[in-house]
Image (tube, coloured by chain):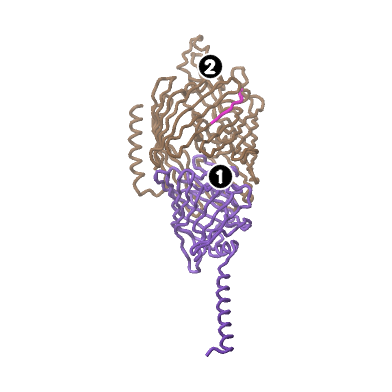
Chain colours: A purple, B brown
């Protein structure tokens, strides 16, 4: 029989149920900044890294060129990235080495035929690097920069879709659209928009590897240049973290060394 | 000569076969290049086959044996039919003493920031030819170079060569060239210019230099000092013996070069890179047959910009004061342009290069096309021609007019 005490009990249970559902719903209502923070938390943490990878260049007719690279990266102050990359094959580009210091503030290129390092002007960063679809700017940019404005555009069961507006006036992109995997908080796709607002490139993370702590490393990536229907795929062969590199490793003295 | 030329080709085939088999201890990278040309001045077809083997071997941590072996066979008029020599062979040690890198052996020191014809590039001669379309190759010279790092942005370079490496002009070429310039009256004296003896007076002093560079936020800059000799020979003496034999002596005057170099962002032009070298040259006084060939100090310089458009059209152009074959009062101004266009859907890359004398408007032009047959095989064909009369500044390049074809295989 339903008496007054029973009714109060039922009301309490209903309120508690609705309250917990509301709390649960509120717990997944993350802001864009929170989503990006989670992505950063899930990224492998390291001071420096060494990556051996294969780059496959695919033209609009499907013709492929394969290049093997070795790349070293180091995080500097203010979350800036310094990178040193060398082509190992094919023979036509073997030994070509790029040094990008602090997100491309200074870029040097060493080509064995010139026998001396050449400084690349900062504003030529939009040029594609060695026939790939990555520009010098793409290789040195950090689209997860804390200073960029972020907005959550929409979400579904699988993904968060965020809009990132760079604060850097020298950047040749007006915005990025990021597609973040909801379950594991890693970026699955990035759409690049030029200063006219046109969608010009798409970067897709095809495969990631998770370590024991749930941190991810992208293992297969593909960037598509929409204007000329050209693609570059990067397949990571091997990656190491926190190497014992000298303080002068990321400098022009390393560019000419026969072995990195 | 034909026998040596053929044997050279045969040897090269054997070496290529040996190199392509796994078994060499060294890390090697090879370039086989076939070049042929039809010169309008001689109406001759020249062939040259060159095998270039780059190698290195790690001896211990950060100590390497490196080098570059050249094997060449040619039927060119003034060329040796077959040569084999290490263009470079040296030991390199990185950080053997903290912040100090060293190289010792037959080495190449490339100073200066300019894309072509840098007046600061004085340690290694170029082969006796001029390239307008690519980086001029250099010939190794015995010596030691050291780089000391004052932090990651400032570098102090030093180089010392125990003796000068002169430009390797063939004797027959020198005789033909100098005598046509300086000995026009010899036949009137009853002398047969084909019986002239050529003597070389070698430079005896040590060649050395220091260079300091610093990396600024938007550009790199450097200053340098060089003390050595002119790598090209200068006429020194023409004597006639009692039995009517002519003896022609050439030598290498000393010089000091104070240099400045810069490379970085081109102010005001987004996407363009500026590179430039300026040299103040203090020569030894040098005269021949009463004429001062070198006297007062003088300037030489190159300044250029390079730029690539969104449609992959590359431009490199600038201003030159004093071509490599000009010294002292002979130096004059030129403009140059080197351009090429890459197509997304094609393996053809057309190119054009020109040097224009701003003194007499003579021009040397190279127009051609590169074609990539495979990832490691490429071909190039070009036509070189001169605009200007026989007294023009660029007329000395007249003999290089013709059609050139090359095939290159990297393996």
**Residue in front for this viewpoint, A188 or B227:** A188
Residue B325 visible in the shown view: yes
Q: Does the magenta stretch include residue B334?
A: yes
Whether tag 1 and tag 2 are in contact, CB under 8 A, the answer is: no
Residue A95 drawn at (x, y percent):
48, 46
In the figure, A141 relative to B213: above or below? below
Q: Does the magenta stretch include residue A259?
A: no
Would residue B250 be found to the left or right of residue B73 on screen? right
* Numbered circle sitting on residue B389: 2
Residue A59 drawn at (x, y percent):
42, 44
Q: Mark 2 lies on which chain?
A: B
Q: Mark 1 lies on which chain?
A: A
- The residue identified by callout 1 is A126
> Dot 1 lies on which element?
helix
Task: State how far apart marks 1 and 2 are (Cα).
Answer: 44 Å
Residue B206 visible in the shown view: no
The part of the chain drawn in magenta is B330-337
């Amino acid at each position: 029989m339903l008496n007054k005490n029973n009714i109060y009990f039922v009301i309490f249970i209903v309120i508690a149920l609705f309250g917990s559902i509301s709390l649960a719903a509120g717990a997944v209502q993350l802001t864009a900044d929170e989503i990006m923070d989670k992505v950063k938390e899930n990224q492998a943490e390291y001071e420096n890294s060494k990556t051996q990878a294969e780059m496959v260049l695919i033209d609009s007719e499907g013709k492929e060129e394969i290049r093997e690279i070795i790349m070293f990266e180091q995080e500097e102050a203010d979350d800036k990235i310094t990178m040193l990359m060398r082509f190992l094959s094919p023979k036509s580009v073997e030994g070509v080495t790029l040094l990008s210091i602090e997100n491309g503030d200074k870029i040097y290129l060493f080509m064995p035929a010139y026998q001396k390092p050449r400084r690349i002007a900062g504003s030529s960063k939009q040029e594609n690097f060695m026939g790939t679809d990555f520009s010098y700017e793409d290789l040195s940019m950090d689209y997860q920069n804390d200073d960029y404005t972020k907005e959550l555009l929409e979400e579904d069961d699988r993904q968060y879709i965020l809009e990132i507006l760079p604060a850097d006036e020298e950047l040749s992109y007006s915005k990025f659209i990021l597609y973040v995997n909801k379950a594991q908080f890693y970026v699955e796709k990035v759409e690049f928009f030029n200063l006219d607002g046109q969608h010009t490139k798409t970067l897709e993370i095809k495969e990631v590897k998770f370590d024991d702590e749930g941190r991810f490393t992208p293992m297969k990536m593909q960037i598509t240049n929409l204007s000329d229907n050209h693609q570059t795929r990067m397949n990571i062969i091997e990656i190491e973290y926190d190497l014992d590199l000298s303080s002068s490793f990321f400098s022009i003295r390393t560019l000419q060394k026969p072995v990195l | 000569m034909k026998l040596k030329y053929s044997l050279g080709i045969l040897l090269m085939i054997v070496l290529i076969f040996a190199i392509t088999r796994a078994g060499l201890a060294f890390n090697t990278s090879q370039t086989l290049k076939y070049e042929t040309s039809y010169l309008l001045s001689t109406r001759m077809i020249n062939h040259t086959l060159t095998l270039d083997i780059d190698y290195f071997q790690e001896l211990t941590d950060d100590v390497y044996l490196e080098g570059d072996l050249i094997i060449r066979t040619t039927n060119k008029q003034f060329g040796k039919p077959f040569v084999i020599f290490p263009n470079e062979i040296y030991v390199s040690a990185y950080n053997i003493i903290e912040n100090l890198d060293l190289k010792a052996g037959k080495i190449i020191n490339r100073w200066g920031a300019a894309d072509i014809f840098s007046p600061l590039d004085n340690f290694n001669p170029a082969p006796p030819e001029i390239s307008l379309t690519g980086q001029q190759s250099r010939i190794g010279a015995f010596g030691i170079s050291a780089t000391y790092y004052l932090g990651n942005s400032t570098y102090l370079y030093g180089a010392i060569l125990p003796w000068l490496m002169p430009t390797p002009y063939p004797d027959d070429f020198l005789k033909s060239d100098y005598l046509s310039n300086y000995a026009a009256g010899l036949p009137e004296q009853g002398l047969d210019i084909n019986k002239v003896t050529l003597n070389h007076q070698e430079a005896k002093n040590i060649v050395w230099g220091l260079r300091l560079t610093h990396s600024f936020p938007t550009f790199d800059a450097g200053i340098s000092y060089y003390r050595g000799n002119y790598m090209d020979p200068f006429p020194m003496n023409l004597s006639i013996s009692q039995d009517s034999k002519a003896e022609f002596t050439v030598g290498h005057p000393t010089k000091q070069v104070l240099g400045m170099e810069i490379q970085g962002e081109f102010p005001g032009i987004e996407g363009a890179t500026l590179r430039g070298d300026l040299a103040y040259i203090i020569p030894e006084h040098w005269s021949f047959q009463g004429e001062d060939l070198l006297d007062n100090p003088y300037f030489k310089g190159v300044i250029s910009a390079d730029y690539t458009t969104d449609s992959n059209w590359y431009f490199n152009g600038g201003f030159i004061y004093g071509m490599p074959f000009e010294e002292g009062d002979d130096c004059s101004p030129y403009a140059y342009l080197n351009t090429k266009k890459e197509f997304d859907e094609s393996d053809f890359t057309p190119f054009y290069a020109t040097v224009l004398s701003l003194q007499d408007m003579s021009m040397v032009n190279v127009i051609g096309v590169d074609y990539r047959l495979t990832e490691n095989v490429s071909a190039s064909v070009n036509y070189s021609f001169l605009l200007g009369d026989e007294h023009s500044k660029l007329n000395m390049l007249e003999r290089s007019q013709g059609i050139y074809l090359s095939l290159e295989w990297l393996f």
